[in-house]
Image (spheres, coloured by chain):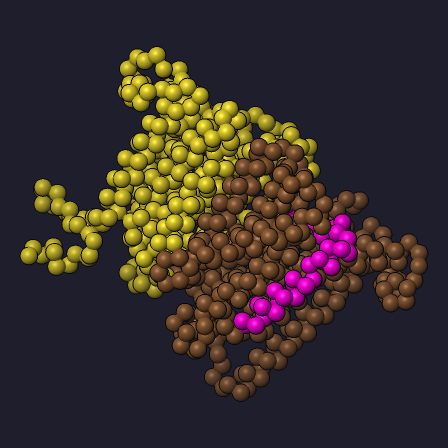
Chain colours: A yellow, B brown
Amino acid sequence: MTPGTRVRPAGYALVRPRSGRGSFLLHRRAAVTALCLAVLLAAVCVAYLSLGESFVAPGEVVKVLLGQPSPDDLIVGTLRLPRMTVGLLVGLAFGVAGALIQTVARNPLASPDIIGISQGASAVTVAALTFGVTSCTVLPYLSVLGGMTAAALVYVFAWRGGLHATRFVLIGIGFAIALRSVTTLLMTKGDYLVAQQAQIWMTGSLNGRGWDVATPLSWVLLALLPGVLWAARAQRTVSLDDDTATALGIRLGRVRLGLVALGVILASVATGAAGPVDFVALLAPQIARRMTRTAQIPLLCSALTGAVIVVLGDLLARKLLSPTELPVGVLTAAVGAPYLIWLIMRSRSGGKP
Amino acid sequence: MSAPAPAAPARPLPAAPTAGRRALTARRIAWTAGGLAALLCAVLLSLAVGARAVPPGEVFDALFRGATGPNAEVVRTLRVPRTLIALMVGAGLALAGTALQGITRNPIADPGILGISQGAGVAVVCAIAFAGVHTLSGYVWFAFAGAAVASVAVYAVASGGRGGATPVKLALAGAAINALLVSVTMGVLTTKASALDEFRFWQVGSIAGRDASVVHQIWPFLLIGAVLVVSVARGLDALALGEDLAKGLGQNVAAVRIVGGLGATVLTGAGVAAAGPIAFVGLAVPHLARAAVGSDHRWVLPMAALIGPVMLLVADVLGRIVVPPGEVPAGVMTALIGVPFLVALIRRKAAVA
């Protein structure tokens, strides 16, 4: 009986480095889930690269990925890889963003596509489309701007001597509905080709996304990585109730602001890259949480789940009605929602959010 | 993430029950009377204001004295049906939102987020795309059936697993079903361009251009739904205290949820069928009503049924005069007018219900 075993909560393993200095608790089930998700994601990615109009053997795919010369360089490396990279990164970003915002709001219904970020991005983008801006280099930045502006407005209006979770979410939804109304109004004003273009963008699509989108997206997300690492720790403290957290000396207001800001930036950037792929941010954290059965929403598993949903969704979107390509947003909910429904129906805990 | 907080009473219970109770009752009666007066004003405005301004005296003559002439014709054939629909839809959506927030104990629940409106939307899209239905009175039955199917699906999913349909499971099941339905809608719209061209005008939500036949089609449903929702008012009060306490108070929790949910479905179905998915009324009105008369559902429900139509009528009237000679649909105006109200209300309250 080592000292470590007596204070260890159920389901955790105590990890001690060889040097003997420092140690941390590892939630066993979460670790196994993350590992399984990572393997699944890798498999889905290889499938994504090898399936399509022309089949490429998985062996060749791996060759291309390792940079060895291969006859399928063009199809895999130039056509499918950048698009998959965008999908993967967008999925990761939405997963993390959803996890953070749901944690701060303490409400499983709160996600970036509910509290106005997606709607802000959509309103600005559809307005731009309606007034004849169609350049693909300008639109992503406009939508990032729209998403962040909407979130900033919500924050300003929800701030009253502190950021109260429910207040933030309610005001967010109010803004979301107002912005969505403006967007639908714009869609009835423009001619119908513009409406169709706007509809596809608002559904979320990876069609024609290449390295010109993937590279800046990678750099931005890499720059945000330290923030995400901080969030992974900070997130646990926010999920306690306010009084406990305050008693532990946590500066709740600041931590919340930091987490929400990070979630908003991630969601806005992802929206800029692929349009508001609805429901990934809502579904991924809830699926991840039900798989790991942790008290908080697991950040890493949410990210991986989000990525699996988007990449698998886009694979189906390319294959299902080929040669017609559906926007990925049509399929993400179709991939994620049934699984969440199944998890709810066989859940062993009655009242856990 | 803890379960969403139950609706807290707007004010702590007073120490002296009799005097405090009397004051509370007086306040409630005052607010209800104020709501009634506001509703009468809104109805009069709705009958008098528009592209052709009709003086109140002539409105009265047209209604009760059988006056003839262009003004009377406009009032009787165009504005009376429009006003009736606003009254019915506003009251219906507000009651539905109040019931759903009570059942799920989630302050951000409303027919939109829980997938009921979306169910109606999917049915209308399918009616346009596959059944060749192109009239408003033809949409009605489809919308109704869609809302019903969506609700049954949400309840069926939520009551699976252990513990039955808990608030959190209901909310999540609603979100998941909503996601699925949205993906079906988007799938049809992005592949059938002609359907989008028609659907975008229904999707905005409007009470203009409906004739009296729609009124006749939906009023029985609204009545049934209202009766169902009001019949579980005490049950909703008990639910706000939590499931165990409600059971302890002798409430049959499952029955309250099913009857209330059924009522909310019937109301939403009728409302969406008549006016399209008008957002915001179902979300915001319950909060406004609770702020006015406290948390007792026997007062909140009638108050909501007064505030809902006021909001919709005022929105519709303003929509007629904002950009003459055109009109802004009521569905857009509700959100644009409602958001400032909601923001002000939520900022004013220390703790959000």
Q: Give the x, y percent position of residue B323.
A: 75, 45
Q: Is residue A18 above or below residue B243?
A: above
**Which residue: 67% across, 59% down?**
B89
Left or right: residue A200 compared with residue A252: right
Magenta: main secondary structure equals helix
**Which residue: 81% across, 54% down?**
B78
Q: Give the x, y percent position of residue B276.
A: 65, 50
Q: Indicate whether residue A280 is drawn in magenta.
A: no
Left or right: residue B33 compared with residue A339: right
Count numbered badges in the picture: 0
Q: Residue lying farthest left?
A: A1
Question: A333 or B60: nearer the eye?
Answer: A333
Residue B330 in sight here: no
Q: Is residue B340 above or below residue B14?
A: above
**Which residue: 65% across, 34% down?**
B194
Left or right: residue B12 compared with residue A253: right
Q: Is residue A183 above or below residue B207?
A: above
Which residues lie in the magenta part?
B204-233
Asked which quadrant contains residue A346, the reply is bottom left
Residue A27 in sight here: yes
Figure quadrant of the N terminus of chain B: bottom left
Q: Give the x, y percent position of residue A214.
A: 41, 27
Q: Residue lying farthest front?
A: B131
Q: Give the x, y percent position of residue A136.
A: 53, 26
Q: Is residue B82 above or below residue B185?
A: below
**Which residue: 34% across, 64% down?**
A243
Q: Indicate whether residue B217 is drawn in magenta.
A: yes
